[in-house]
Amino acid sequence: MICVNDIEKEIGVFVPMEDDDVLVCRCEEVTKGEIRRAVHAGMTTIEEMRRFLRCGMGLCQGQTCGKLVKGIVAAELKINPLELEPAVSRAPMRPVEMKVMGKDGGQGGDAV
Amino acid sequence: MSERIMEHPILGITPEGKKVTFTFDGKELTGMEGEPIAMALKNAGVMVHRYTAKRHEPRGIYCAIGRCTDCVMIVDGKPNIRTCITPLAAGMEIQTQYGVEEKR
Amino acid sequence: MERYDVIVVGAGPAGLSAAIETAKCGMRTVVFDENAKPGGQLFKQIHKFFGSKENKARIRGYRIGEELLAEAERSGVKVVLNATVMGLYAQKEITVRIGDAIKHYKADNVLIATGAAESVVRFPGWTMPGVIGAGAAQTMMNLHHIRPGKRILMLGSGNVGLVVSYQLLQAGCEVVALVDAAPRIGGYGVHAAKVSRCGVPFYLSHTIVQAEGTDHVTGVVIGEVGPDWKVIKGTEQHFDVDTICLAVGLSPMSQLLKQAGCAMKDTKGGYVPECDAYGRTSMDGIYVAGDVSGIEEASSAMLGGSIAGITIACDSGYLADGSEQIAKYEKALGNLRKGMFAPENRGKKITQTEEGIAISETLLECGYVADSEIERYPGVTHMEGVHPVIECTQNIPCNPCQDVCPKKCITIGNNITALPVVDSKSQCIGCGMCVAACSGQAIFLIQEDIGDGMGTVTIPYEFLPLPEKGQIGIALGRDGQPVCKAEVLDIKSSNAFDHTNLLTMKVPRDMVMRARFFKS
């Protein structure tokens, strides 16, 4: 685990890249450059990244960009993507309207 | 212009569906009842389903199975409807979505 | 709250196979699936499957889907569609969205068979309308009968990229290029060969530089990648396309398992639950089967599902002894996991077949076996009269050709991955069953001399419109390049061939070993 205070020492300063403007998270429109900058700002886990930039928090819930974000964060931290802790997995697995969610009384479950 | 496959070397002759009319941004189009809205639009040559909120970029069909949510549009006044898995019905009003709403 | 003995999440090949087994043992089984139609991806698979008779080889995927559904119904499995499982909890309770309600169900056993989602790559313009997943292309053309585009570039040379490229051609689309950043094709050589011979050029060690267009894709630029995986300046080339199709791998959809608290592991093949060979996860009563536990293909998903289903029945006391059935399925599964593309060989460069024959370099790098390489394989022989020429050049677990020949001309033997050998004293009657049965479309009937300096080549043909007898066209080589003029002598179609037509063309004698496709 990298100590946030030492981050520049560990991974160097942010160096702009040609493809920084390419979108990674399609739903929340987060670019590669934003993700890389966030790493330098101290977001070293997927969980922090999601809260900080909202990448993977949109309608598709990270279904599309999850792997890409992981790859970019790992590359910036100069570690293997397998070393990064995956994001927490929470219900609901698919987007659902609040009015539907709100009706969940914890029972239901009639015979189908 | 049609992208409909009428006869396929493996799947044979495409079963004839029931033609219905619907509107896309006020323009009348036809499609097959029950097929995903996105398919009827694709067949009519519509590529852009929405423009994104931040960068105002065009989006269309991407995964076609309801996962990526890129193809969402306003259907009968309701935004964020995944058109690739929502069946077409006669008289539907389909609108291009701008951000999460219709064009102002 | 409604309780079941078994809740299965996902009505694909793995989930249905498992549910069939548990229901057969008398367990109350329900399958939830978020889609409007069951079968998972099976109904989009219109090609014939590899394998042996025991695991439905040479049957097209969608037919297997139909059989599986019928069996599920016969076994008393309840399938609930448009039912999205939103959460899985340690007490083996699930929340399901059905219509505008969230419902709760509980079971003694929960099997997760949610399959996989397509992976993506990014490049400038990848979010533009016209860039689609390969699965999207399959869904559009094979389920909804809509062509995904007119001129298409495919990225990815794994089996998905190869198979979908061929299906695009069958749907009447033009595939202008098949591109992969890897230096060698990733999928089966026979799948590549059938795309190549139709004239689709392969660009290995290439990647997409950008998609072009303002509102939707109107073109694409690709470039050669160097050893550092970056595009080499000056190698860029442009194609006019309206569609870019991405086939860059699959990732297990394992979120439900993680949410429930199952022990997980991050692997190169994705984030998967820790489980034993029978589908048991770290949590009592929670099982997995199919791609969600590691990407394979539909045939192994079905076998894995069956094994998990029997295991659930045994663990719950509904089946006293399932060891015999499990052994049977394990044997079939073991066979499917043999050969060059076996899980343990992933990422390895294999240079020789099991028989010690050099693998075709051209096949790996360009997508077809070169004329100078083809003679080294045991299925490629020369003899008088009509006889099969089998261009099967890699060890894959598949043997229908051996089973269908009424004259027993073709031998694979007990080792299912062995290359087929054609008996030199072949009594071939030219029935063409082998040509139609070969899932890789790698078998041709050749008659080297029919007089007048001409010979005939019979090829599997799965396109429309069917050429007519007497039609003159061009014969294409394995590389898709024109080799000579050809005349169609015969077109045979039969129920036994299952939509694979046999096209016999007359070509000059010296072209019978080169002509492999007919273009009107």
Image (spheres, grey):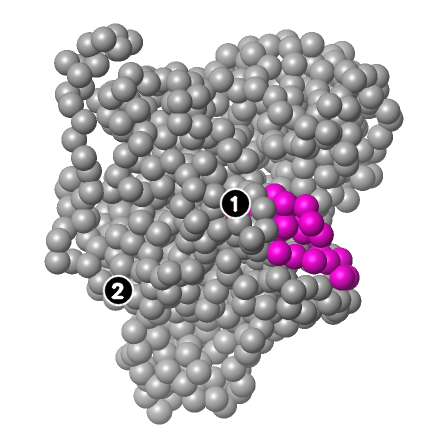
First to last magenta residue range: B70-95
Q: Report x, y in % for residue C379.
A: 38, 58
Q: Quadrant of the N terminus of chain C?
A: top right
Q: Which residue is mark 2?
A: C238
Query: Would you call the spot at circle 2 few (<14 residues within 10 Å), some (14-19), or many (20 or more)?
Result: some
Q: Nearer the viewer, residue C514 or C306?
A: C306
Residue A66's image quarter? top left
Q: Are marks 1 and 2 on the same chain?
A: no
Query: Would you call the spot at circle 1 few (<14 residues within 10 Å), some (14-19), or many (20 or more)?
Result: some
Residue C263 against residue C372 in the figure, above or below: above
Q: Report x, y in % for residue B58.
A: 45, 53
SS assignment at label 2: strand
Horizontal side of residue C470 vs C95, given as left or right: left
Q: Looking at numbered disc 2 in the image, what kind of residue is underneath it?
A: His
Residue C18 against residue C441 in the figure, above or below: above
Residue C461 against residue C143 in the figure, above or below: below
SS assignment at label 1: loop
Q: Which residue is mark 1?
A: B99
Residue drawn where x is 47% and y is 46% of the image: B52
CA separation, marks 1 and 2?
A: 32 Å
Residue drawn where x is 39% and y is 31% of the image: A67
Q: Looking at numbered disc 1 in the image, what kind of residue is underneath it?
A: Gly
In magenta segment, residue C109: no
Horizontal side of residue C394 vs C297, given as left or right: left
Q: Nearer the viewer, residue C32 or C286?
A: C32
Q: Quadrant of the C terminus of chain C?
A: bottom left
Horizontal side of residue B10 vs A111, given as left or right: left
Q: Chain of mark 2?
A: C
Q: Report x, y in % for residue C159.
A: 42, 48
1 or 2: mark nearer the eye:
1
Residue drawn where x is 63% and y is 62% of the image: B24
Res C291 seen here: no
